[in-house]
Image (cartoon, rainbow, N blue to C red):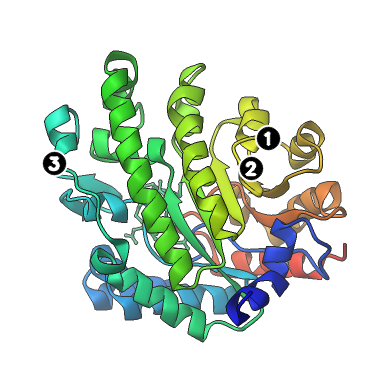
């Protein structure tokens, strides 16, 4: 084991992912770098927009490090977006402010036009950003890399932009299942390599975001979302870093989500943490799950809601505190910091 790996295994966040005892509960927040921070908005303005920020190693580093430092979070998540691999495969992408593909992929011709790529070459800005960020982080802080799960990424690529009804995606799910399987296989190949490169560049954990999976009913959730998430997780397992799977609105299918091969299951705010722990047993670490809207309430409300979660599940090994989805725009910065303090002060 080299020095990097030895340090990685000692970090509080990684220890919790491995269900080892920790001195206090590790905490980081999905979207801890983002529009709620004036410094992030200034950096984005200075860079000339979200995409310019996301494709420059120095600004990736600055956004990631600033968020970690300002919160004293136990992990940083590298600043990027799940749609970067779609761009790297050849899709025209803009942000307004969500991702928007000029030419959505809806047929075999569109799929054939997508190419696999070498992430070290095509996304050198990201790998360089990871190396610089790792060098700038305190030794005890973990760096998380991430990719979108195949189904969630396919949703954006088919629909073209974030959607309320996911109508175009659903038409493909029910009407063109063979095409969708081909597309998911190709995306899986791309995100596996994209994730692997992030670990090679210095990330000490990986999160698979399957934010759109909960749009599917059964049996499609298994066939199109879980099947490909499992394929990605199994392919990444030999890298030896902790793997986190986060799905949304899949509380009814937590047992199956927990069986896909991740070390940690990210639980959204719809399922009480205590229920998740009772249903899943102790063989998997859990991460979550305060409702992000709680951060708009008074500090006493934040304290009591966070402590409810901590008291319910944090006393046994294998828990990482997070929100049940990302920090929302306009969230008061001091409330976010207050939440981190509450978790840091909790004695397990
Ligand atoms: O104008 C802006 O500043 C754009 C806002 C923004 C940001 C800050 C987007 C556009 N992406 C990001 C960064 C980002 N995206 C990160 C790194 C920041 C961090 O966590 O600290 C990560 C992990 C993501 C992942 C991501 N992008 C997901 C999965 C997680 C989730 O929130 O569900 C999804 C679905 C996207 C798509 C996306 N990118 C951006 C938007 C506005 C959206 C649509 C979904 C949404 O509104 O949340």
Of 224 and 272, which appears nearest the observer? 224
- Within 8 Å of ligand 1, the CB of disc 2? no
Nearer to us of marks 1 and 2 is 2
Vertical comparison of 156 with 120: above or below: above
Mark 1 residue element:
loop
The structure residue drawn at horizontal position 19% and vertical position 48%, both measured from the top left corner, is: 115
Mark 3 residue element:
loop
Vertical comparison of 265 with 183: above or below: below
Res. 172 visible in picture: yes
- Numbered mark located on residue 271 in the image: 1
The structure residue drawn at horizontal position 27% and vertical position 18%, both measured from the top left corner, is: 176
Q: Is residue 307 left or right of residue 256?
A: right
Q: Position of residue 141 (x, y in %)?
A: 62, 75
Of 341 and 26, which appears nearest the observer? 26
Q: Are marks 1 and 2 in contact (CB under 8 Å)?
A: yes
Q: Are marks 2 and 3 in contact (CB under 8 Å)?
A: no
The structure residue drawn at horizontal position 62% and vertical position 64%, both measured from the top left corner, is: 335
Q: Is residue 54 left or right of residue 272?
A: left
Of 212 and 122, which appears nearest the observer? 122
Q: Quadrant of residue 271?
A: top right
Separation of marks 2 and 3 at Cα, in angstroms: 36 Å
Q: Quadrant of the N terminus?
A: bottom right
Q: Which residue in the structure is indicated by mark 3?
A: 113
Mark 2 residue element:
loop
Q: Quadrant of the C terminus?
A: bottom right
Q: Position of residue 123 (x, y in %)?
A: 28, 66
Which image quadrant shows ligand 1?
A: bottom left
- Numbered mark located on residue 267 in the image: 2
Nearer to us of marks 2 and 3 is 3
- Mark 2: few/some/many CA within 10 Å (<14, 14-19, 20+): many
- Within 8 Å of ligand 1, the CB of disc 1? no
Q: Position of residue 257 (x, y in %)?
A: 61, 34
């Amino acid at each position: 084991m080299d020095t990097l790996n030895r340090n990685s295994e000692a970090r509080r966040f990684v220890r919790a992912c491995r269900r080892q005892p920790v001195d206090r509960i590790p905490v980081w927040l999905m979207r801890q770098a983002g529009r709620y921070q004036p410094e992030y908005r200034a950096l984005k303005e200075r860079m000339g927009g979200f995409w310019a920020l996301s494709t420059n190693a120095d600004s990736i580093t600055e956004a990631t490090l600033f968020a970690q430092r300002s919160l004293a979070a136990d992990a940083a998540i590298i600043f990027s977006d799940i749609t970067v691999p779609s761009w790297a495969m050849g899709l025209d992408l803009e942000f307004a402010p969500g991702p928007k593909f000029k030419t959505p992929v809806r047929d075999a011709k569109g799929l054939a036009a997508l190419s696999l790529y070498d992430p070290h070459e095509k996304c050198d800005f990201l790998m360089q950003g990871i190396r610089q960020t790792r060098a700038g982080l305190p030794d005890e802080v973990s760096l998380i890399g991430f990719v979108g799960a195949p189904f969630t990424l396919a949703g954006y690529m088919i629909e073209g932009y974030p959607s309320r009804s996911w109508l175009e995606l659903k038409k493909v799910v029910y009407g063109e299942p063979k095409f969708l399987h081909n597309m998911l296989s190709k995306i899986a190949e791309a995100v596996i390599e994209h994730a692997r490169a992030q670990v090679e560049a210095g990330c000490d954990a990986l999160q698979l975001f399957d934010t759109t999976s909960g749009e599917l009913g059964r049996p499609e959730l298994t066939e199109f979302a879980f099947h490909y998430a499992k394929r990605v997780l199994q392919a990444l397992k030999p890298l030896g870093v902790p793997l986190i799977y986060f799905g949304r609105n899949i509380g009814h299918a937590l047992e199956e989500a927990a069986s896909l091969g991740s070390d940690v299951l990210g639980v959204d705010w719809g399922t009480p943490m205590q229920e998740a722990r009772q249903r899943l047993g102790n063989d998997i670490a859990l991460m979550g799950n305060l409702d992000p809207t709680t951060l708009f309430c008074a500090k006493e409300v934040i304290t009591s809601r966070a402590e409810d979660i901590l008291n319910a599940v944090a006393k046994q090994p294998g828990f990482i505190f997070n929100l049940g989805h990302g920090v929302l725009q306009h969230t008061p910065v001091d409330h976010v910091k207050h939440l981190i303090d509450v978790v840091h002060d909790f004695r397990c």
